Amino acid sequence: MTTTPFLTLERVCWQLPDGRLLFSDLDETFDARPTGLVGRNGVGKSVLAQLLAGRLAPTRGRCLRSGPVAWLPQQIDVSPTASVADLAGLGDALAALHRIEQGSSDVADFEVLGERWQLREQLQTELERMQLCGVSADTPASRLSGGQRMRVALAGAFLSDADFLVLDEPSNHLDAQGRQLLREQLRRWPRGLLVVSHDRALLGDMQRIVELSPLGLRSHGGNYAFYAARSSEERRLAAEALQQRRHERRQGEQALREQQEQREHRAARGNRQAAHANQAPILLGRQKQRAQASAGKAHLQQQQQRERLDEQVRQAAAAVEAAAPVVLLPVAGTGDAPERVAVLEDVVLPFVDGALARIDLLLRRGERLALTGRNGSGKSVLLKVLAGHLRPLQGAVQMNAPHAWLDQHLAFPIAAAPAMAQLRHANPAMAEAGLRTRLALLGLDAAQAQRPVEALSGGERMKLALACALYAQPPAQLLLLDEPANHLDLDAMQALETMLRDWPGTLLVAAHDEAFLQGIGITGRLHADAGGWRRLPP
C-alpha cells in the first residue's frame, strides 16, 4: 500500500459492441481526495468505474493504479451457498485462518492470510459497527436483504488493504440509518476514494466532484453544493452564449441578404444600361463574364460566412448540457378528490412482524406524506396493500379516489410496447397529438416515444410511468411511490422533484433520500419504528 494513492486515465476510450464510442480520450488523475463521479444515466459512469478498478480493460489508452483497488458494484449478487465472509471478500482468508488454527502448516494458507490474525474479530466488529446485529461470518448471505448485503460488502471493503475504494451507487439500497453509517465509515477511510452516486448528501461529503458527459471529464473542486452552484452558473452562461451566437447569425444572415439585394440591383441597373449602350458585342460579353465571376465570388464568400455563423452556433450548442425543463399540464379532476382519499381501519399487514403489523391510517386530500423507516419495516407492504396488490390479514381498506402505484421496478401494462402505446393504453380517448404533446413536455421526444420501455433510461421510464398515471382516464388522485428516485441521475431526479412538487394530488412516497423528500414538499411523515407507525412533522 502506497502513501500517495492515485488512479490515472491516459487517453482512455471505450467502444460499445455496435462500434460506437461511449467515451474517448479521457485524461484524468484521481488522487487521495474523496471524489464523487456524477453524470447522466447512460453516459458511462459504471463502465468508467470498472475501468479504474481494473475490472475492464479500455479499448484504447491505459489506466494506471498506485496499488490494489476495491470495487463494489451497484447490485451485490450472491450464490446460494455464499456466506457473509464470502460476500465480504474474506471467505478464503478466514478459511485459511481456520485451517491454520486446526494445525495446518500449508504455506498457501499463510500466504492467503498474511498478517491478518485478528481478521475474524475485525470482521465481527465491522459488522456490528454497520449495525448488522445477529450476523456473523458464517451467516448465509442469501438471508440478507439488498441493503444488508451492501453493508456487508462495505464492511469487507473497509477491511481490505486496498489503496483505493471505487463504489458504484453504494447508498441505493440503504435506508436512512444505513446511509448515515455509510457516510460515517467513508469519513474514516484513510486512503483513496471514488464514489459514483446521485446521493446529494453523500456527495456533499466529497472534496471534489468530477462530471462525465459527452464532452468528456470535467473536474470541479469542492463538494456537491459547490459543483451544483458552479454548474448552474456555467449552464446559464452557456445558454446566454448560445442565444448570442443565434442572434449574431440572424444579424449576419440579414446583412448577407441585404448585400445580395444590393448586388442584384446593381446588376439589373448595369444590364439596363448595357441594353441601351452602343457597344460592340465582344465588349458586352466580357462585361457579362466579369459580372458573373464577381457574382460567383460573392456567392462563395456568402456561403463561407453562413458556414462560419452556423459553426459558431453549433459550438455554442455543444456546450449547453442542461436537460430540457419538464412541464406537467394541469390534470383534470385532482381537485375533485374526496376529503378522505384512503382509509385503513384495524388493518393487519401480511409479512410484517410486531407492532408494525397493525395500522390505522387516514389519508386526506392534498396530503404529501413521506413513508420512512428501516429496510424491512413494512413500507413496501403497506403501499402494496393500499394499491390492492396485497390483501390485509384482517381489517378494512377503503380507497375513495383513483390511485396509481409505482414500484421500484416500474412495471408497465403492455410488455415491450413503446412509450406512446403505454400512454394510449392509459387514455385511449385522447387524440394522438395530445399524447405526443404530453410526452414531449416531459422531455420524451418523438423518437423516444416510439422506443420500447426497456430501451428508455431510468429517468425516462419514471416520466412515462407518471404520465400514464396522471394523464389516465380517470387520472390518479393518489400516488403511491416506492423509492421513485432509485437509479435516477441527478438531472432526472430534479425533473421528478419538479413534477411531483407541481402536482396537486395526494402523495404517499417511500424514500430514504432526504434531499428528495424536501424537494417534493412533503407535509408530514408516516414513520415505522419498533413502537409501530407514527405520524411525524415534515
Image (cartoon, helix red, strand yellow):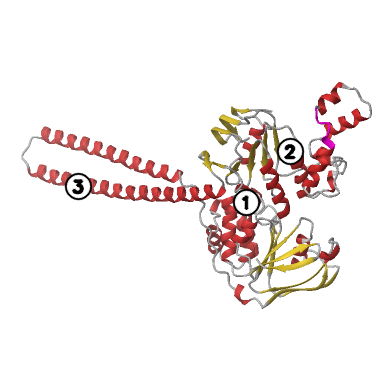
In the structure shown, which secondary structural element does the residue marked by tag 2 occupy?
helix
**Residue 348 occupies which quadrant of the picture?**
bottom right
Ranked by sequence position, the earlier of labels 1 and 3 is 1
Residue at 72% from the left image edge and 69% from the top image edge: 535
- The percent coordinates of residue 273 (x first, y second) are 10, 44
| Kind of residue at disc 1 | Ala
Task: Between label 3 and label 2, give the one nearer the viewer.
Answer: 2
Q: What residue did someone put label 1 on?
A: 201
Type of the residue with mark 3: Gln
Amino acid bearing label 2: Ala
Q: Residues within 10 Å of mark 1 (few under 14, many from 20)?
A: some
In the current view of this chain or complex, which residue is farthest to the right?
Answer: 102
Identify the image quadrant of residue 206: top right
Contact check, label 2 and label 1, Cβ < 8 Å: no
Q: Mark 1 or mark 3, which is nearer to you? A: 1
Instruction: Please give left or right for residue 449 compared with residue 255 in the image.
Output: right
Mark 3 surroundings within 10 Å by alpha-carbon count, few (fewer than 14), some (14 through 19), many (20 or more)? few
Q: Disc 3 or 2, which lies upstream in sequence?
A: 2
Residue at screen point 60% across, 43% down: 36
- Would you say residue 333 is visible in this rendering? no
The residue where tag 3 is placed is 262
Q: Secondary structure at mark 3?
A: helix
Instruction: Please tell me the numbered disc located at residue 157.
Output: 2
> Is residue 393 or residue 307 the one in the foreground?
393
Query: Going 65% across and 74% down the picture, which residue do you hit?
Result: 365
Alpha-carbon distance for marks 1 and 3? Answer: 63 Å
Secondary structure mainly formed by the magenta segment: loop
**x then y, percent, for residue 177:** 73, 54
